[in-house]
Image: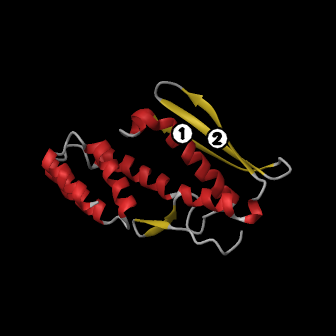
Amino acid sequence: MSNTYQFKTTNIKGKQYVEVNQRVIAFRTLSEYKGFALTTELLHIDDSSCVVRATISNKEGAIIAQGMAQEDKSSSRINQTSFVENCETSAVGRALGFLGIGIETSIATADEVDMAIKKQDSTSKDKGKSGSDVFASSVTYIKDGKNKPERATRLAQITAKYGDTLTKAQQTKLEKLV
């Protein structure tokens, strides 16, 4: 792959990860991928989960990379309404990673690693957390965002997961951090 593309990364626990949108931008703009196709296929869906496969084909139509993802509707509040979309995005990110785009540190994308950490954290640490504990952690998480869009995304994640735990005053304070 061309060394001219500079990926924006997200620091997660001291390691830099490329976000899916960065891989898509590189795929759509770098000349070596001109004429390539990216398709997705819903392999399984029911009321609680789905599986998506993303496939990348070269100009001649030969499959050169694939990625798979699985999402559970109950894994987060965002997934309650968007588990299929999140699954497709993850599959696309993995397929582009297997193609070799944005894999300097990992095939996994920032989105994928962040979600995995959140799933682990929610099953172990968050049980029994008070609103003040959630608020304190949320302040740090938002402040660690590099820019306004990233801080806004982090706020949306917090609100989706802990909206019922935080008071209105706490939510207002978090919004001001964005």
Mark 1: amino acid: Gln
The residue lying toward the viewer, choosing from 177 and 60, is 177
Badge 2 vs badge 1, beta-carbon distance below 8 Å: no
The residue at 52%/39% (across/down) is 85
x then y, percent, for residue 165: 19, 42
- Per the image, the residue denoted by label 1 is 70
The residue lying toward the viewer, choosing from 161 and 113, is 161
5 in relation to 113, above or below: below
Q: Residue furthest right?
A: 60
- Per the image, the residue denoted by label 2 is 53
Left or right of residue 32, residue 96 in this image? left
Mark 2: amino acid: Arg
Which of the 4 image quarters holds residue 31? bottom right
x then y, percent, for residue 143: 28, 65
42 in relation to 154, above or below: above
The residue lying toward the viewer, choosing from 31 and 126, is 31
At numbered mark 1, what does the secondary structure look like: helix, strand or loop? Answer: strand
The residue at 37%/50% (across/down) is 118
The residue at 49%/67% (across/down) is 9
At numbered mark 2, what does the secondary structure look like: helix, strand or loop? Answer: strand
x then y, percent, for residue 49: 49, 31
Which mark, residue 105?
none
The residue at 39%/59% (across/down) is 149
Q: Quadrant of the N terminus?
A: bottom right
**How many residues crowd mark 1 within 10 Å: few (<14), some (14–19), many (20+)?**
many
The residue lying toward the viewer, choosing from 18 and 71, is 18
Looking at the image, is mark 2 or mark 1 earlier in the sequence?
Answer: 2
Colour pattern: secondary structure
